Image (tube, rainbow, N blue to C red):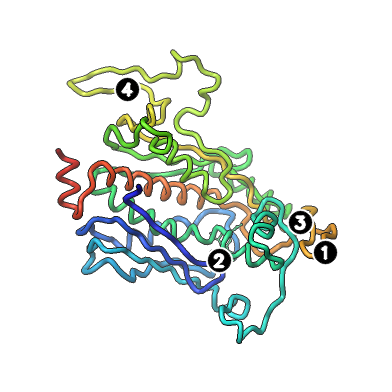
Amino acid sequence: MEKFRFLTSGESHGKCLTAIIEGLPANLEIDIDFINEELKRRQCGYGRGGRMKIESDTVEIMSGVRFGKTLGSPVTLVIKNNDFENWQKVMIADPKNITSDKAFTTFRPGHADYAGSVKYNQKDLRNILERSSARKTAIEVAVGAVAKLFLKQFGITGSSKVLQIGNGKTEEEFRAEIDKAKAAGDTLGGKIEVVYENLPVGLGSFVHWDRTLDGKIAQAVMSVPAVKSVSIGNHHAYKMTGSEYHDEIFCEEGKIIRKTNNAGGIEGGMSNGENIVVTAVMKPIPTLRKPLCSLDCVTLEQTEAHFERSDTCAVEACAVVAEARVACVLADEILLKYGGDCMEECLKHFNN
Ligand code: EPS
């Protein structure tokens, strides 16, 4: 059973995004400026679309925090969607006041539209687009920021970066690749890396498949919208021999050390004290200005996919979201191993 749990709600063009976090100990300092800086990081990045000019994501804390510290009760976070002003007629909840019921009915290959419309029995694909949109990652980053504040108390810090966009491997090449795709009405994916440092040994376990730390991290990162693969450590393992791949163990001045980290900080489903290194591949965004062949979900006629304002590339945002997701997994593991009702108790367990 998880200790750090959260649920989110909210549609892309609805009023707001909300999260309720359960399991945080009392007396954790909550730095709202830090949460907002993390939200800003998610909004930045070359290749983002018009929506990011409308939004300036900031969090409001609705419960669970008093005078800057958690109370041990559920923490509720809210991010307002500025764009709701422009979508009120389309997104209204009350059926008595509908004034705009124009449906969009052509599937975007690669998005949730097709499978979602079958699963939820919808003919207006807006009913699928709204929640499947990556907009919801804003509130997930806010939750991740709270997890990062918790981890910081134990000296654990995280970061992320973009490794590749299209064929580009430098910042300059990223921009050139994005410009080229944008000019062609196309989109681009890429590869990102998340690193967490200063971990204790023994988070996660080998005793059951659903307790492995790498398994939990893989699920958390794989479910970031558009992510298609996740690896831990050296992703060239398939072509290495055992003697090349495995990280030899030494002892220097009474400290266990490794000279390599091909395992990415996880052996046998547990943290081994080295940096946790996660890489992930994001596919290109499926909403294309130059639409692909598709079908109309009502008439089943061959047509062009729906286009609606989108990003050319959101790989930088993907890195920040993945970093937030890993923070949530690690915060949960710390609570499972060293948990308590207040921070003082958790830190006492940890220092023991
Ligand atoms: C996003 C908000 C969305 C998209 C994007 C991510 O806003 P809008 O649809 O109003 O432009 O920009 O979502 C997608 C690309 C997608 O395919 O879901 C955000 O806040 O990150």
Nearest the camera: 99 or 317?
A: 99
Dot 4: element: strand
Q: Earlier in the sequence, mark 1 or mark 4?
A: 4
**Residue 36 seen anywhere in this rendered image of the structure:** yes
Residue named by callout 1: 299
Q: Which residue is drawn at 43% across and 66% down?
A: 18
Q: How crowded is mark 1: few (under 14 residues within 10 Å), some or many (20 or more)?
A: few
The residue at label 2 has a CB less than 8 Å from ligand 1: yes
Task: Give the alpha-carbon distance from disc 2 to disc 3, as whole Å.
Answer: 21 Å
**Alpha-carbon distance for marks 1 and 2?**
27 Å
Q: Which mark is residue 30?
A: none
Type of residue at label 3? Pro
Q: How many labels does the image show?
A: 4
Ligand 1 visible in quadrant = bottom right
Return the disc, 4 or 2, that comes first in the chain's sequence.
2
> Badge 2 is on which residue?
12
Number of the front mark, 2 or 3: 2
Quick one: SS at disc 1?
loop
